Amino acid sequence: MRVCVIGAGLSGLAAAHALRGRGIDFVCLEKAPEVGGIWRMPGAGERGPAYSALHLNSAKQLTGYADFPMPEELPLYPRHSDVAAYLRSFAAWAGLTPHIELGTEVVAVRQEPDGSWTVTSRDARAAETVRRFDRVVVASGHHSVPALPDPLPAGSESFAGTMLHSMDFMDGRDFTGQRVVVVGLGASAVDIAADLSRHAARTLLSVRRGLHIVPKQLYGMSVDLIAEAPWFTGKTFAEQRRFVEEALLVARGKLSDYGLPEPDHPVFSSAVTISDEILSRIRHGAVVPKPAIDSLEGDRVTFADGTSEQADAIVYCTGFRMDFPFLPAACQAAPQGPVTLYRRIVAPDRPGLFFLGLIRPVGSITRLVEAQARWMARVVGGEVALPPADVMRKEIDGYLGGIAERYGLSEGSSIQVDVGRYVQELQDA
């Protein structure tokens, strides 16, 4: 049995560790020149989602691997460079480094009639290598293809300033003295707006739809540690929601008091934004909330409320599209619409193809990815047998039905999972 793991970020390393622990032969192909995934800063000529202000939003105790905790000397929420260094240390400690080929981009994955997989990769010198594997694990993440508003605001083609996606943003100091509009209210938008507000002449935050903004700590406890606490997990879902909503009112009041739109949905019915900074920056006047952009003309940005401002730059923090261009169209986890994977891991019509990390929990993803990796290794090693494709599709339909009822069904919501329930599901499988 030989396995190809694509990606050497948090998910890929978890997959490699689980395979090595069971004595299964594998190679891990990583496009970047270093281990670290989204936590390493892009080098010259690279693009990536990391930026200078990026820190963990989850506590280090839950973000480190179970067998290799994060160093005690690190702060509770380490910065990106600390996380990237930790991942490199884990790869060395776990004996994974000899199995990782850096600077190696996977350009094509094709399934053969006998069920095996042909993987074509390209190294830094553009030399291509073709290899045959029994299984393929896609752990390359879903933060590689920027998503921009479609359509862009009227007049975008004539905007006199700079327009960029968060993927191309590095440091607020690059915009010193400028007037900048940040579009979005997700994690990258609030981080980037807070960073810009220390350097730009004026920072505007354009928000189309309200989201629940949750501080990293409530009652002195990290929110992801609260989510794991027995006293919290023992509550019903309605009780959990009520507890968090009351805690948020105490911690920060109403979002409309900050000039932000109130969410049109209860907490836990959509993704939340974790931030300790953005509301403080708004209260101090360093970040000014605005509604959605209506149109652009020259250097002027007009918003949905009719107000307009001059701007030198617009930073679109509007997320990413799930895209795996190296896979055949029939293998895509989400070519359009919701992700349809058995146990959020297996493509039912391609049982030799696994996806790790294609999930979105409230809190740290590490424990979930490790559970996915262990289950995947058991399947690959023959300890767990996959059910027929129709049974896998039935499980997927049941899961997506629950998602639709709770969140409404979309590409993003279809990867939402509850931490405790999902881990238990994989352990029991």
Image (cartoon, rainbow, N blue to C red):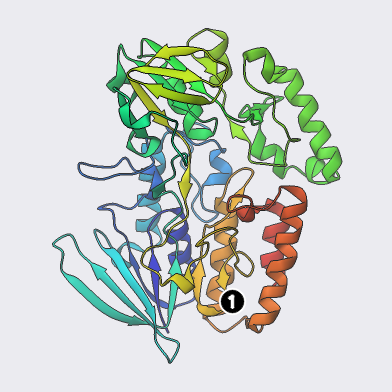
**Based on the displayed image, in which of its 4 quarters is residue 179 positioned?**
top left
The picture places residue 299, in percent across and down from the top left corner, at: 33, 17
* Residue 172 visible in the shown view: yes
Instruction: Using residue 36 as the reference point, say whether residue 259 is left or right of it.
Output: right
User: Badge 1, how many Cα within 10 Å: few under 14, some, many 20+?
Assistant: many
When the figure is inspected, residue 186 is found, relative to residue 131, above or below; the finding is above
| Residue nearest the viewer, comparing 373 with 167 | 167
* Residue 170 visible in the shown view: no
The picture places residue 408, in percent across and down from the top left corner, at: 71, 49
Residue at the left extreme of this rendering: 125
When the figure is inspected, residue 388 is found, relative to residue 146, above or below; the finding is below
Instruction: Using residue 158 as the reference point, say whether residue 218 is left or right of it.
Output: right
| Residue nearest the viewer, comparing 205 with 353 | 205
Residue at which label 1 appears: 348
The picture places residue 77, in percent across and down from the top left corner, at: 51, 33
**Where, quadrant-wise, is the C terminus in this rendering?**
bottom right
Give me the residue at 57% from left, 64% from top: 372
Residue at the bottom extreme of this rendering: 114
Instruction: Using residue 194 as the reference point, say whether residue 230 is left or right of it.
Output: right
When the figure is inspected, residue 226 is found, relative to residue 177, above or below; the finding is below
Give me the residue at 57% from left, 38% from top: 59
When the figure is inspected, residue 248 is found, relative to residue 88, above or below; the finding is above
**Where, quadrant-wise, is the N terminus in this rendering?**
bottom left
Secondary structure under badge 1? Answer: loop
Give me the residue at 28% from left, 74% from top: 120
The picture places residue 110, in percent across and down from the top left corner, at: 37, 78
| Residue nearest the viewer, comparing 328 with 60 | 328
The amino acid type, in three-letter code, at marker 1 is Pro
Say how many tags the image has. 1
| Residue nearest the viewer, comparing 147 with 423 | 147
Give me the residue at 52% from left, 65% from top: 333
